[in-house]
Amino acid sequence: MEMTGRYIINSPRQKVWEAMNDPQILKQAIPRCDEAIRHSDTEFTAVFSFKLGFIKPQLKSLITISDINAPNSYVMTAEGQGKIAGLAKGKANVVLIEKDEGTTLLEFEASGDMQGTIADMASKLVTKTAQNLADDFFKKFDDVVSSQRQMI
């Protein structure tokens, strides 16, 4: 599975960078995220569930940040597993570009693979669900980060 995306985040790049590295902010933005725990500056665990047709699998994912070029870019690698969901692996190259008037363009290129019952049953549905999750995440992420900026 391959995905790309471009999203405008209504906050300055430094603020977006800090938020993209804060598991508690990510938890607020990840649809149906149950927990996010930081293990180090470059590693955290997230547990979330999602709806895939009539199935609601849960994934526990170890997320690692590498190739850090603050506040411009990094590579995010995730490996998750769940009883129903099986095994999921993904990697995303994330780039932040400062735009006019305190906005940031966030671009990503991601690839992923899923193995297990769900992947065997519905590979096209998995891709569509992943794109919907990305869209939902970045909309909510923008809402969370933008509202924090206004509160300061």
Image (cartoon, rainbow, N blue to C red):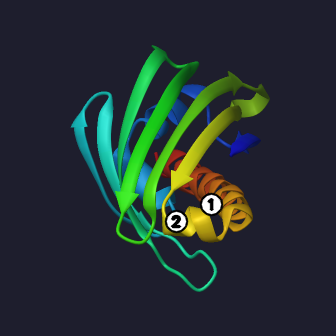
Residue 41 in sight: yes
Residue 73 percent coordinates (x, y): 57, 21
Task: Depth check: give the residue in front, 141 or 49.
Answer: 49
Answer with the quarter of the image where residue 42 lies. Answer: top left
Residue 139 percent coordinates (x, y): 66, 57
Q: Which residue is mark 2?
A: 31
Which amino acid does the dot numbered 2 rest on? Answer: Pro
Mark 1 element type = helix
Q: Is residue 106 above or below residue 80?
A: above
Mark 1 Cα shell of 10 Å, populated few (<14), some (14-19), many (≥20): some
Task: Depth check: give the residue in front, 145 or 61.
Answer: 61
Q: Is residue 65 above or below residue 127?
A: above
Q: Is residue 35 left or right of residue 108?
A: left
Answer with the quarter of the image where residue 97 lies. Answer: top right
Return the mark for residue 133: 1
> Mark 2 and 1 residues: CB-CB less than 8 Å, in contact?
yes
Q: Is residue 56 left or right of residue 140?
A: left
Task: Depth check: give the residue in front, 117 or 136.
Answer: 117
